[in-house]
């Protein structure tokens, strides 16, 4: 049965309306699946958020592995991503973005506003491809939102002016997502400094989540105990490459994390993972995803 799906992407900041989109998708509604897949892309980040036919990619990993993984999900005639979110323009997060843009149709690219003019090679190549394909590139800050049927994504970080006062990693995008009755917190590569500021400006309910993407691949400089206590996740996922040269994830950090999270999944050890909800979010389904 053909049915119209209305997808609203409403992006607004505390201070001013940055942009707003209204996209109408004409699709065959066969999938009602709501899930998040944390891809195994080696040393880097890439997560796919799915609410029915609406697909949102957060980060694109270091290389073409992300496009290869996406191809397994986007089979058949639908090869479209509603939004690609870029947490920050570093190679382990956007090295694979040009290949994603070459392979799939993308409705919009979102990135923290202060990173829009980054000179990083992969970002410049991505901007060129976005321009060729008429893909809007939109800057976001704390307060921006993306809404689609069954999905609400809030940008919690960075605040305006972050980049001028902090290292790049500390200004990476942090998003809180409600999908399929489950709360997720995605933390890019932020460190203790950003975690402290987030704690200071956010009510606990805004940070708490059942599923946490561990910041900065489990770096020892990214684990502030108070931050994890407030989030209080059931499952924490650390995305890192096996035997990477950075020593991520830090073994002592992983051990300490056991005090704050019930389950811990490392893509370096177990590969990708798919998370979805059962019984309206009362139970979680956690399965490995190749
Ligand atoms: Zn990274």
Image (tube, rainbow, N blue to C red):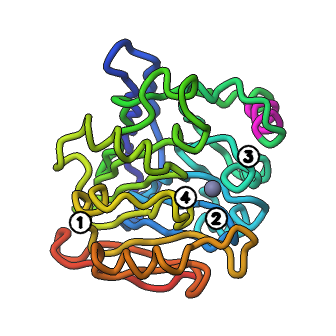
Disc 4 element: helix
| Residue matched to label 2 | 70
Look at the numbered disc 4 and say if its residue's Cβ is closer than 8 Å to ligand 1. Answer: yes
Tell me the magenta residue range.
123-130
Q: Is residue 281 magenta?
A: no
Q: CA distance from mark 3 to mark 4?
A: 24 Å
Q: Is 79 on the left-hand or right-hand side of 174?
A: right
Q: Is 158 on the left-hand or right-hand side of 182?
A: right
Q: CA distance from mark 3 to mark 2?
A: 12 Å
> Which residue does the image show at 23% across and 77% down from the upper left?
278
> Which residue does the image show at 60% across and 37% down from the upper left?
167
| Residue matched to label 3 | 101
> Which residue does the image show at 54% across and 26% down from the upper left?
165
| Residue matched to label 1 | 232
Q: Quadrant of the C terminus?
A: bottom right
Q: CA distance from mark 4 to mark 2?
A: 22 Å
Q: Quadrant of the N terminus?
A: bottom left
Q: Is 80 on the left-hand or right-hand side of 191?
A: right
Q: Is residue 208 visible?
A: yes
Residue 32 quadrant:
bottom left
Residues at discs 3 and 2 in contact (Cβ within 8 Å): no
Q: Position of residue 46 (x, y in %)?
A: 59, 60
Disc 2 element: helix
Mark positioned earlier in the residue sequence (4 or 2): 2
**Viewer-nearest of discs 3 and 1:** 1
Quadrant observed for ligand 1 in the rendered image: bottom right
Q: Is 206 on the left-hand or right-hand side of 55?
A: left
Q: In the image, which disc is placed on residue 216?
A: 4
Q: CA distance from mark 1 to mark 4?
A: 18 Å
Q: Total of numbered circles in the picture?
A: 4
Q: Position of residue 98 (x, y in %)?
A: 78, 47
């Amino acid at each position: 049965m053909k049915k119209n799906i209305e997808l609203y992407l409403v992006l607004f900041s505390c201070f001013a309306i940055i942009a707003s989109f209204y996209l109408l998708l004409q699709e065959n509604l066969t999938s009602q699946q709501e899930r998040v897949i944390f891809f195994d892309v080696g040393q880097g980040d890439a997560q796919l958020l799915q609410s029915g036919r609406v697909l949102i990619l957060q980060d694109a990993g270091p290389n073409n592995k992300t496009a290869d993984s996406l191809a397994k999900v986007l089979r058949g005639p639908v090869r479209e991503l509603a939004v690609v979110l870029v947490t920050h323009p570093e190679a382990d997060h956007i090295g694979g973005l040009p290949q994603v843009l070459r392979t799939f149709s993308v409705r919009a690219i979102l990135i923290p506003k202060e990173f829009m003019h980054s000179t990083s090679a992969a970002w410049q190549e991505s901007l060129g491809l976005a321009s060729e394909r008429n893909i809007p590139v939109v800057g976001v800050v704390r307060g921006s939102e993306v809404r689609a049927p069954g999905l609400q994504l809030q940008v919690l970080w960075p605040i305006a002016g972050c980049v001028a006062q902090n290292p790049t990693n500390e200004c990476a995008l942090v998003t809180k997502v409600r999908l399929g009755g489950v709360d997720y917190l995605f933390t890019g590569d932020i460190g203790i400094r950003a975690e402290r500021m987030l704690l200071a400006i956010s009510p606990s309910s805004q940070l708490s989540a059942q599923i946490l993407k561990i910041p900065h691949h489990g770096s020892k400089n990214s684990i502030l105990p108070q931050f994890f206590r407030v989030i209080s996740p059931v499952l924490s996922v650390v995305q890192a490459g096996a035997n990477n040269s950075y020593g991520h994830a830090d073994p002592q950090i992983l051990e300490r994390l056991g005090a704050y999270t019930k389950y811990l999944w490392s893509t370096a050890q177990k590969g990708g993972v798919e998370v979805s909800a059962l019984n309206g979010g009362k139970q979680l389904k956690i399965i490995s995803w190749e």
